[in-house]
Image (cartoon, coloured by chain):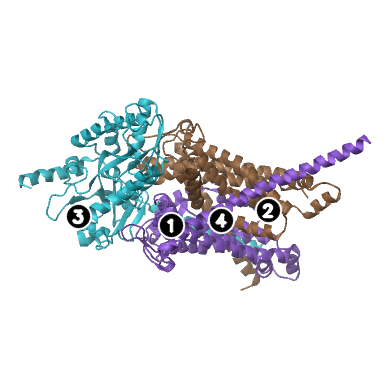
Amino acid sequence: MKRRTKEALFFGLFRACAVIVVASLVIILGYVFINGIGKWSIQFFTQNPAPNIHGALVEGGILSPLVGTLMLMALVFVIAIPIGVLAAVFLSEYWGNTRVSRVWWIVVNNLAGVPSIVWGLLGVALFVYYLNFGLSLIAAGITLSLLVLPLIMVATKEAMEAVPSSMREASISLGATKWQTIRHHVLPYSASGILTGIILSLSRAGGETAPILLTGVAINAAIPGALTDQFQALPYYIYFNATQTSDSAQAYPMAYAAALALIAFIIGLNMVAIWMRNKYRKKYRW
Amino acid sequence: MATKVAVKRRKLLRAFLESGIAAALLVCALVSVAVLILVFAYLVGNALPFFGSYSLWSFLTGTVWMPVPPYPSYGVLPLLMGTIMVSFVAALIAIPIGIGCTIYLSEIASPGVKKWLKPAIEVLASIPSVVYGLFAALVLSEWLKAIFNPVTRLNALNGAIILAVMIIPILVSISEEAMNSVPRHLKEASLALGANRWETIRRTIIPAALPGIVAAIVLSIGRAVGETMAVIMATGNSTQFTTNILASVRTMTATLAIDVPEATNGSQEYYALFAVGLLLFVITFAINIIADYVMARYREAYK
Amino acid sequence: MEKKMMYVAVAVVIVIIVAAVGAVLLLNKPAPSGPTAKIVLLQKTPGAVAYSPLNEQAVYNGSYPLSRYLYLYTNGIPNSTSSLYEWLSYIYNANTGEVDINNAGFYPLQTADHAAMVAQLSHGNTNSLSGDFKEGGSTTMAQLAVLWAAGFKNQTGHTVTISLGGSGVGISNFIGGTVDVAQSSRAMTATEKASAHAKGINVTEWKVAVDGISIIVNNANTVTTLTISQLEGLFNATFTNWPQVGGTNTPVTLYGRDYNSGTWSSFKDLVLKNKENYSQSMLQANANALILPEVENDAGGVGYVGIGYAKEVAGTSSTAAMISMAMVMAAAGDDL
């Protein structure tokens, strides 16, 4: 076969691979959209889930799951993000390339791969029982924070390592202290990467089901009034209506509609991340 | 005279602030250390008592998982088989498609296409696993039923395909980074010597990026092994020991999700489940170590 | 130019193939018309009268072999000022709780049982739980509990939060103290009661409703009646093909719950009389509601669900019930 033909053939195959990947995205999103959009209405977003005559939660809307998910993400934002970002900054700037830090990052990478169910089990044992928070929003929130902590640390580290060392060296040689260097010369350039990491971690936390299943989600919870209340969440609502309730003819569309809402929200967050990333990239080029 | 004092004071203040900030960051790092140690201690601590009352050999080679009195049997093989089948087949599907897509994205696609293709793949990566599970349980299972006519709609293949869709984005993003990091002069030299683009990719770029690609493959397999929700909704969760891809299986993660909440704290079943969790952790740990090793070699070669 | 044409062509061809396959699959999907599964009548021995779980009297008097109670467990009997007392009163009231039980598809307690429970309620003074509280456990009772909680909130303003996981999880949480009431579709075992006592919990059992575990099969299957021993044979893998018990020629696929489930446990006690285990190949759904669509889609499928979920299968519950009522009347004439 001629070399040119070979190249054309393989390139065609690779193009097909990309098509398959995009097609799977389009198919999945398409199915969720088509089956779920019919249920979207003002009522859908402003009412709590309500039982129909048989007790299936297919009436009303998704207000309490939506707010529950937002509250969980807020908790993760407040707990995991500061600790994770600052810890990674410390580890990558102050402890740099020592043996300890290398081992340390191996461990963090491994934690990032721990299955979410294991975090759920840890959360139950530690927060629900041992620290006696009970089945509650705070127990679930801290569990999710632990889950995303490794993710945010790795993202921050990658973003900071991408900044060339020449910048740091230049800054120090001009007399700046270490913290000044970090604050004015490293962080701004890694900010876009860190922001992307933050948003990805928040989306991940919002979409997790297994940890919250064990630490406090309830099927008929209203909007939580206190951190010790139980809560509803979108992923659980989807899971419940897709697999655990009768009247499936009415339940499936509600599950799809809630899935559509969750995806739309997460995609929205990602769009914000991309926009911020582009904006920062333009501002801080090196 | 006054300015000298002022300068000195400011220097002291700055030094103080510096060490204060360093201390604060150290505290944050220590918190994360504590978390890691906690997870590991929790798993190991709850798994060890199991091996006091049950032999490691029967655990690792038993083919019946039925933790029900009066004669419970804790063979992990069905669960291990379930995890391996689902992850392995998912990898078989995801690797060719993922690598092909990566090559396209990094070498063939025009900048205009890249601009929406990369975000599209990132979107695929951020779809929550419960939505993938929903799709697998309600839609994909129907399609598989029409094509393969399996005995049960929910089976290992269903789980494998949806897992493949889930891990392709990870595979693509890490491999793409690897391929983009290949120094341009290698590519340019190859083209200058008369190779066409495919030959350049095949003989220069891919071998140079190979460690990164291997790391990507290994990491995505790790992700597949650790997935919980999507496989619970897609595979049917029967505890049979089988090698039939069209039969229902149960993965180790599903077992943890289903059985641990119910097991009484301190019972043999409870410890057995943590032994399963420990095994899972060991497997993902091994996978990550391999990936780290490969990546480290690759980074050193091209720094 | 020639290069570009070539690989665009290859790609387009592949896209067309994929689209064609997709279209074929989508068009081939048959639209389900009405229920595609049915309830099997059960008889205790070959030749005896077969009863349907839709037959309320048969479930009450035990003629239907798979009858069982649904339970709530509390820590002691509530005194009359506590919200828990109001909850139980709501549940046992014919105009509120019992209406919900019927709507969810189960059967309210018979008169004698009901009277006993009400009498137990009147002896309270040890539990003074007030305000909102937490309940959790059985997925079989999930929808029933949601109906109760909604009605209860309307009536008294108190919120009862329901979480799930299975009867085993509910009991485990009850013993651990993270829920105040456990809902369970099986009775607590002696070991569980002992653990509870060790933690200072005064376990009080409340029967709240009656369930007939229903056996459902696909509509394409010709079997209509099974004996208990045939059922046992199906679920312990003795029978692997439907003709062995009188059905259409397809292999048997089993759908059940997982071992968190009270339904799993009750079925085992009532059917697997030799204390053996279920067949390993049984699919273990983690909710009753999952079993239904699987049986509907599998010609050789057989599953067990609580009656509340089976009623959806029967569509209008009248047909099957009338068949078994007719059989009862005919049998009564033959001197049962």
Q: Is residue C59 left or right of residue A31?
A: left
| Residue at disc 4, secondary structure | loop
Chain shown in cyan: C
Marks 2/3: CA distance? 64 Å
What residue would you read off at disc 4?
A113
Residue A169 makes an appearance in the image: yes
| Residue at disc 2, secondary structure | helix
Callout 1: chain: B
Chain shown in brown: A
What residue would you read off at disc 3?
C228
Q: Are marks 2 and 3 on the same chain?
A: no
**Residue type highlighted by circle 1:** Tyr
Whether label 1 touches label 4, CB < 8 Å: no
Name the mark nearer the viewer: 1 or 2: 1
What residue would you read off at disc 1?
B271
Callout 4: chain: A
**Residue type highlighted by circle 4:** Gly
What residue would you read off at disc 2?
A158
**Residue in the foreground of this view, choosing between A175 and C79:** C79
